[in-house]
Image (cartoon, helix red, strand yellow):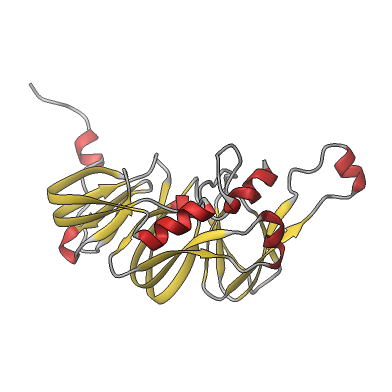
Amino acid sequence: MTIHGSLFTDFKEKDSQDPFSLQNKKLLRIDMRYGPVQAKTGSMVAYQGDVRFANKGSGGLGKMFKAAVTGEGVKMMECSGTGELFVADEAAEVQVMYLENDMVSVNGNNVLAFSSSIQWDIHRIQARGAAMTGGLYNVSLRGTGYVAVTTKGDPIALDVASSPTFADAQAVVLWTSGVSMDVRVDTGGLGSMIRGGTGELLQMAFGGQGYVLVQPCENVVDGGHQSGGNQQGPGGMLGQLLS
């Protein structure tokens, strides 16, 4: 029997010499020739060759302690071997960047994969207004190598140096080094509060030099600015106030 149609040509694997390359907007191909990588636990959808997976959990005792205290964290697995690894996360869009001795601060839920040369840790966000939320925490990715994050829809990268920049805490995916963040309370005035409020009570205010990446969906969870509904530690209080 013969199969007719363009299915197997339209969606054939795309060859690439890059360590991280997009097969489409929602699927990342990792070339294992360049060494081990860290990937979000459970993100493997396929591989060709001999790829092995080791559960790294929250990434050591120090990170496990921080995750337990703050309610934040990201579970990673170490991927090593030969061949090609394909990873995705619930059909979210994948964004790839290359850090050269640089750093980004990422919501933990949006971390998909990164080179083993990238150092990562859970860090407290220094923000004056964060005291009222019990503290804010993100995942820092630092060093030289590839980083892949996910977004719900195509994001927008806002240059915070060009104008005062504000964003809904549940839509912020990451920001680059050189960017400062504070928490702004916007009640909309007494009349607005009496009518039930605007739904935009707590906002992230950004300044400094660099970019903040915002997705067109207000449901970022599990990182430094969580949505409500989960049992979280102090770091999740901003999400509870937003819910």
Tell me the quarter of the picture where residue 183 sits. Answer: bottom right
Say which residue appears at 49% left-offset and 45% top-offset: 152
Residue at x-position 65% and y-position 51%: 238
Question: For this rendering, which residue is in front, 22 or 87?
Answer: 87
**Residue 150 can be seen in this image:** no
Relative vertical location of residue 134 with respect to residue 216 in this rendering, above or below: below
Residue farthest to the bottom, as pictured:
101
Closer to the camera, 66 or 179? Answer: 66
Residue at figure coordinates x 28%, y 60% from the top left: 20
Picture coordinates of residue 171, whole percent (x, y)? 59, 50
| Rendered location of residue 113, percent (x, y) | 34, 56
Residue 222 x, y percent position in the rendering: 51, 48
- Return the residue found at the far left: 1
Residue 58 located left or right of residue 236:
left
- Residue that sits furthest to the top in the current view: 1
Task: Tell me where residue 127 sits by quadrant.
Answer: bottom right
Left or right? Give the position of 33 relative to 165. Answer: left
